[in-house]
Image: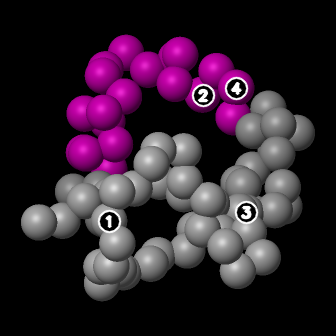
């Protein structure tokens, strides 16, 4: 049986929020590194130039994007 447990790895120790009542088990560990602020995408200053870009469409923006994609 597989079970997923959220935990924090801190200086060689795995800290869980819930108790784990298992004496011995094989584990697979995936480490999710925290992204720095620089890696989290566009800054608000960059996004501001796109403000209101979809408000002027007479057609559905999703349909417009699909039509453009099909033209390419």
Height in image: 23 above or below 59? below
Residue 22 place in picture, x, y as percent: 32, 65
Mark sitting earlier along the chain (1/3): 1
Mark sitting earlier along the chain (1/4): 1
Q: Which residue is mark 1?
A: 22
Q: CA distance from mark 1 to mark 4?
A: 53 Å
Magenta stretch encompasses residue 19: no
Mark sitting earlier along the chain (2/1): 1
Q: Which residue is mark 4?
A: 51
Q: Which residue is mark 2?
A: 53
Q: Is residue 6 left or right of residue 42?
A: left
Q: CA distance from mark 1 to mark 3?
A: 32 Å
Q: CA distance from mark 2 to mark 4?
A: 6 Å
Q: Is residue 29 left or right of residue 50?
A: left
In this view of the protein, can residue 71 be seen by the observer?
A: no
* Kind of element beneath mark 1: loop
* Kind of element beneath mark 4: loop
Q: Which residues are magenta?
A: 50-68
Picture quadrant where residue 63 is located: top left
Q: Is residue 42 left or right of residue 18?
A: right
């Amino acid at each position: 049986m597989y079970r997923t447990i959220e935990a924090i790895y801190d200086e060689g120790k795995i800290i869980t929020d819930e108790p784990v009542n298992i004496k011995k088990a094989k584990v697979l560990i995936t480490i999710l590194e925290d992204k720095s602020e620089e890696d989290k995408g566009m800054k608000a200053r960059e996004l501001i130039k796109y403000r209101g870009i979809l408000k002027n469409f007479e057609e559905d923006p999703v349909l417009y994007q699909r039509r453009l994609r099909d033209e390419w």
